[in-house]
Structure formats: structure tokens, C-alpha cells
Amino acid sequence: MHTQPSHPDTPVLKSKLPAVGTTVFSVMSALAAEHGAVNLGQGFPDFDCDPALLSAVETAMRAGHNQYAPMTGLPSLRTAIAHKIAACYSQQYDIDSEITVTAGATQALTTAILCAVHPGDEVIIIEPAYDSYLPAIELAGGLAVGVPMQLDEHGYRVDWEALADAVSPRTRLIILNTPHNPTGTVLRESDLRALADIVRGTDILLLSDEVYEHMVFDGLRHESVCRHPDLAARAFVVSSFGKTYHVTGWKLGYVVAPAPLMAEFRKVHQYNVFSVNTPMQAGLATHLADPAPYRDLPAFYQRKRDLFRAGLAGTRFTLLPADGTYFQCVRYTAISPILEADFARFLTTEIGVAAIPVSAFYRHGQESGIVRFCFAKKDETLRLALERLARL
Ligand SMILES: *Cc1c(COP(=O)(O)O)cnc(C)c1O
């Protein structure tokens, strides 16, 4: 990377996040581009969204919806969100006091952490964990307590006993993610019951990252925290339009929470983001009113998952279960004994398919001989990747 020599008058800035460097996602995407590799690393679709959504946004722009939106989001979009949550999870959220539109799920997650976590508070994260949680906890002055998922031949699952043991009087927040990135694990009702037993009678808050809520396969049900009133009563629940509508570049999402929690969320949101993109909110409000696109999403991605898994069946990769999300984790230890990051690099530069090492989702880089592929790609992209992976 090209670095400019620093000006002698530039003061030394003591980093608030000394451990943060370039993310593995950016590194692998750059490496994939450099080597002409099929990029199954970073999680984003290589196909476009529904043209009707583009038209709805364009119509909104031409109709003059181009100034600041209300701080909490357009009323039409908050109304559509409330209806969707009621239809999907039978939970009512108040449009005025319990729903906020955000600049993607990442901002919702960071803002929730910033408003909830005080210096010295402990935050429980389940590892492997999405990479944005830790820096947000550190910026808030909190202390992340990692609980590793259990891994066996049935895949990854949350170890609720270990999680219960990790709770201390300083635990302020537990962060959940279902369907889970990177493992594809989908929490079951029994998982949420175990969680409810842990938090009952405490003042522990929950932050539930549900950006893959509409990507759950094989007839499984997404156990949204919204479905469980005792959990919803203490939870921020986050989703992403980028994930649901194939528009990750729009960076639009939302958070719902009981009014007292949302009031604190908005105090931070108001002075950090204020409000988000107006015409896209208007377009999404129109689009979200129709349940068909998110209702059809499981079948859409399940077919891609099955195509990808069928293609890998003849290789020496061991396929882990993939119940949700658009990720497939594979064990490569029958092919090579090397470290995950080295194997991902080898796949990218020598085989021509980029992947992400799962060790990147652990604070201490735990090695399991597993990499993650993203199958949110055109069939032809997946076929090209499979052709190359078949060489292994
Ligand atoms: C993609 C992703 C996000 C971020 O969503 P944006 O709307 O793009 O900010 C958050 N959490 C998980 C688990 C993700 O995979």
C-alpha cells in the first residue's frame, strides 16, 4: 500500500483502536481482483436488485423527496417496518417511539453499543463474531467477553452453559446474531429459551443482529428475538435492507427496541448520523409493503446453496451445515494442514477463488481448518468457482 510521508507538524494521535487494521474482507477482495479470482470472499451479491425498487427510488427523487428525512426515518418506512414485523413475528412496535431507520445495520449495531455500554461494562459476544462488534465495544470503553461456539460434526452451536458462566455482575449486554455469519447457524426456539433463562431477573440488555432474517432454509423458522416478548422487552433488534433486497451499497437498515431503550439510542443517533438517505427510504417504503420479495428469499438462496453444495460434494472439502445466511463454511483439512489465512490466500492466488478464513472472526484467531464461501452470486459465477475448486 502507498503511504504518504507524514508532515512533521502532524501531531501524534493516540489510537482509540490500536488493534484495528485493514479488514480481511478488503484484503481478500483486493487480492481477488489482483489475481482475477472469483470473489466468494466478501459477502455481497454480484447480481442486481429488483428494477421495481430502482423505479420506486427514482420516482421518489423526481417527486422531490431530496431533503433531510425525519431523524427517526420516514413515517411511511417506519409504518411498513412495523407491519412487516407484526406479520412475520406477531410483535407490535410503536412507529413513533420504537423504530429508527439507520445507515445500514452496522450503524445500528454501533449506535446501540455506544448508547448502552459504559466504561468498564462487560459485553458478551459469541465467537466467531461479526467484525464490527468489537471495535464498537472498545470505543464505548466496554470489555468484550468472548464465548466460543461449540464445533462438532453437526456444525457450530451456541454453548449456553459457557455463556451463563461468562455472565458477571458487570455484564451489560449480550450480542446475538441469527442466522449467524460466518457459520450459517440458525438459532432454534430452545436456544432462545436458554437465553431467556440466563437473562431473566437481570438488567442485561440484548442486541440481536438479524440481518439475515429472511435467509433461513429447509423450512426452518427464523427465531427473531421479536417473537419472544420476554426477550424483546430488553432487546435492540437490527436488520438490513442491503441484505434483504440485494442492495448492500445503499447502507440502509433499521433498529427496533422498547421505547425507553430507543430514546437512548436516538440521543446518540441524532448527533452522529442525524438522518439517512430520503429517496431510498421512500423507495423502500413502497417496496417493503409487498411481502413477496422477502417471502421468496429463502427459496431463492436455498437453490443457490444447494447448487454450490452439490458442486462441492465431489471434492475433498467437508461441508458444514448451512441452515441460513448466504455463507457456506467448509473444512479443508483433508486437502491441506496450513493455517486458515494461508489457505484462503492459496485459494485466491493459486486456485482462483477467494474465501474468508473463519479465524478472522475470533479475537484470538482461533484455527479450525475452516474457510467461508459466499454463495450470493449468479449461477454462472458459482459454476466458474466450482470448476476451479474441483481441481483440488
Ligand atoms: C452484513 C452484515 C452486517 C452489516 O449490514 P449493513 O446493513 O451492510 O451495515 C451486520 N451484521 C452482519 C452479521 C452482517 O453479515
Image: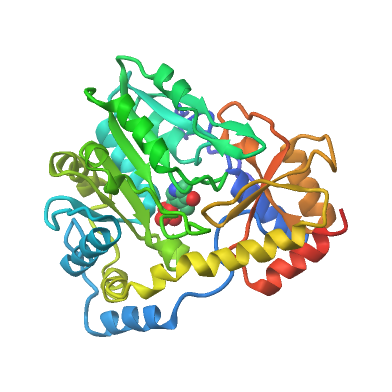
Position of residue 342 measured from the top left corner of the image (x, y, whole percent): 77, 40
Closer-to-camera residue (220/231)? 220
Q: Is residue 264 above or below residue 46?
A: above
Q: Is residue 365 above or below residue 61?
A: above
- Give me the residue at 17% from left, 43% from top: 258
Residue 297 visible in the picture: yes
* Residue ranking furthest to the right: 391
Q: Is residue 320 left or right of residue 289?
A: right
Q: Is residue 374 above or below residue 117?
A: below
Q: Is residue 325 left or right of residue 256?
A: right
Rendering quarter of residue 29: bottom right
- Give me the residue at 69% from left, 70% from top: 381
- Give me the residue at 51% from left, 58% from top: 217
Q: Is residue 172 left or right of residue 389?
A: left
- Give me the residue at 46% from left, 64% from top: 249
Rendering quarter of residue 170: top left
Position of residue 159 measured from the top left corner of the image (x, y, whole percent): 49, 28
Position of residue 344 measured from the top left corner of the image (x, y, whole percent): 74, 46
Position of residue 37 measured from the top left corner of the image (x, y, whole percent): 75, 61
Closer-to-camera residue (338/62)? 338
